[in-house]
Image (cartoon, grey):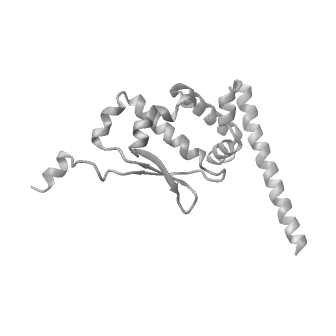
Amino acid sequence: MAKVAAMAMEKVDAKDAKDREKIEAVRKVMRKQAPLSPKQAEYCNDACVERFLRAKGDNVKKAAKTLRAVLSWRDTIGADHIMADEFSGELSDGMAYVAGHDDENRPVLMFKIKQDDYPKYQPQKSFVRFLVFTLEVAVASMNRFVDQFVLLFDASKQSPSPLDRSEGR
């Protein structure tokens, strides 16, 4: 029995070593393209790189290319500079939050945005920043083996649209 357990542990260790090599290979490809800023390097932690590898079928080059595109997008919207203070009103109103985790350990994000709330998000950049902030909180709560989250929109407080009113006629 001990021999079977030892063999199983060797397989796990070999898989971990292979995973580690692929993670480092993605980082190496990315560094060849351009150096990573300290914030980018922090974002590209093992769990993040593993998710990109799984999403790209363990293809190192594709994972690096996609991750580099995400880093570029994050730079464009200023994701590393988004602070909770920007959204103190929205957060205190409970407009968006991580409501826990489901049975598969995926974060559950809840958005409660009423039609009256939309003017707060003009220009649209404000809404995108609020959405990114909420997603960042959710991703930070994910363990390294989770690749998905659950996103729920609560429209129960929504006023009926003109189409809804005409249906009863």
1 versus 73 height, above or below: below
Q: Is residue 43 left or right of residue 158?
A: right
- Quick one: which residue is furthest to the left in this view? 169
Q: Is residue 122 left or right of residue 148?
A: left
Q: Which of the image's four quarters has the N terminus?
A: bottom right
Please tell me which residue is depicted at 64% across the width and 43% down the height of the picture: 52
130 versus 76 height, above or below: below
Q: Which of the image's four quarters has the C terminus?
A: bottom left
User: Which of 97/8 is in front?
Assistant: 97
Q: Is residue 127 left or right of residue 31?
A: left
- Quick one: which residue is furthest to the bottom in this view? 1
**In the rendered image, which quarter is residue 23 located in?**
top right
Residue 132 location, x and y as percent?
Answer: 49, 37
Q: Is residue 6 left or right of residue 22?
A: right
74 versus 54 height, above or below: above
User: Which of 26/90 is in front?
Assistant: 90
Residue 62 location, x and y as percent?
Answer: 65, 38
Please tell me which residue is depicted at 86% across the width and 60% down the height of the picture: 10
Residue 81 location, x and y as percent?
Answer: 55, 28
Please tell me which residue is depicted at 32% across the width and 36% down the height of the picture: 118
- Quick one: which residue is furthest to the right in this view? 3
Q: How many marks?
A: 0
Please tell me which residue is depicted at 30% across the width and 53% down the height of the picture: 156
Residue 94 location, x and y as percent?
Answer: 41, 46
75 versus 101 height, above or below: above
